[in-house]
Amino acid sequence: MNTPRRFERIALIASQTPEAEAARATLAARYGTVAPQDADVIVALGGDGLMLQTLHKFMTAGKPIYGMHRGTVGFLMNDYSADGLEERLAAAQTTVIHPLRMRTTDISGTTQEYRAINEVSVFRSSHQAARLRVLVDGRERLAELIADGILIATPAGSTAYNLSVQGPIIPMGAPLLALTPISPFRPRRWHGALLPDKAQVTIEVLDPAKRPVAAVADHDEVRDVRSVEVSMDQSIRINMMFDPDHSLDERILREQFNF
């Protein structure tokens, strides 16, 4: 029989909205709060934007993160209640996610590296469509994609921007990435691909001077890129916690039947 986990030191993080700040004050008075570096668990109060910020900030801290919805969009959050927080944390199920690693090279030769929880997007930054070459594990798969752009999404991010551009929803347990075009013009009948999560995707910009392109890892943007390499960083494990009846796996499955 498994012994329930105990989280005695709770760090409370809230977005800068009256609703989230009030929730933090209520929970702090009832359960106490410590600095994140001293905590057993981090509780984020807000919407998906705050959750993404929290996941990025504590990506390598090794601390479980439990969100409660006190914002606008709350797909990554549990329902809010001031009651029974310690019991909910003890009963919560853990979903392990790995971020994407984005490595860019711009037209001056400068390289930069960022991580993304949801997706890496490569898209045009002028009035002209981007011209892109797509390679998977070093092998050319598309000699030329003319489109507004292309994105690579994780299972956790497959219901975000990826879904809005008609990409596939990926179950959390599936070892897959979504490679999805954004408003493709040529080839017209290419709607994207599902790739193994160990694949390395390289996007080369064919005409970076005339048709400038930007790359974004969640919220970190690099402009005037010449090439973008994307792969899943299996060395980083982020532990997200969800109520048993409100798991991320269940919500992603449910999303596929909502119209």
Image: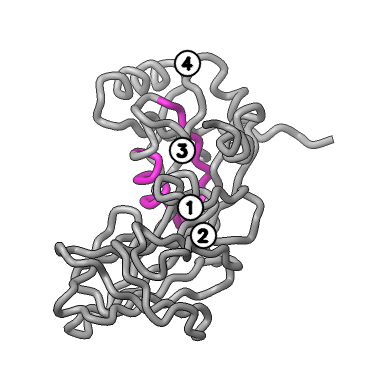
Q: Is residue 254 magenta?
A: no
Using the numbered discs, state the Cα–Cα distance from disc 1 to disc 2 in whole angstroms. 7 Å
Q: Name which of mark 3 and mark 4 comes first in the sequence.
A: 3
Residue 26 drawn at (x, y percent): 38, 16
Using the numbered discs, state the Cα–Cα distance from disc 3 to disc 4 in whole angstroms. 15 Å
Please, which colouring scheme is shown? Answer: one colour
User: How many neighbours does mark 2 have within 10 angstroms: few (below 14), some (14-19), or many (20 or more)?
Assistant: many
Which range of residues does the magenta coloring cover?
Answer: 50-69
Closest to the camera, between mark 1 and mark 2, is 1
Residue shown at the point (28%, 63%) measured from the top left: 123
Closest to the camera, between mark 3 and mark 1, is 1
Badges 2 and 3: C-beta atoms under 8 Å apart? no
Of the numbered discs in the image, which one, if any, rests on residue 167? 1
Q: Name which of mark 1 and mark 2 comes first in the sequence.
A: 1
Secondary structure under tag 3 reads strand
User: How many neighbours does mark 4 have within 10 angstroms: few (below 14), some (14-19), or many (20 or more)?
Assistant: few
Using the numbered discs, state the Cα–Cα distance from disc 4 to disc 2 in whole angstroms. 37 Å
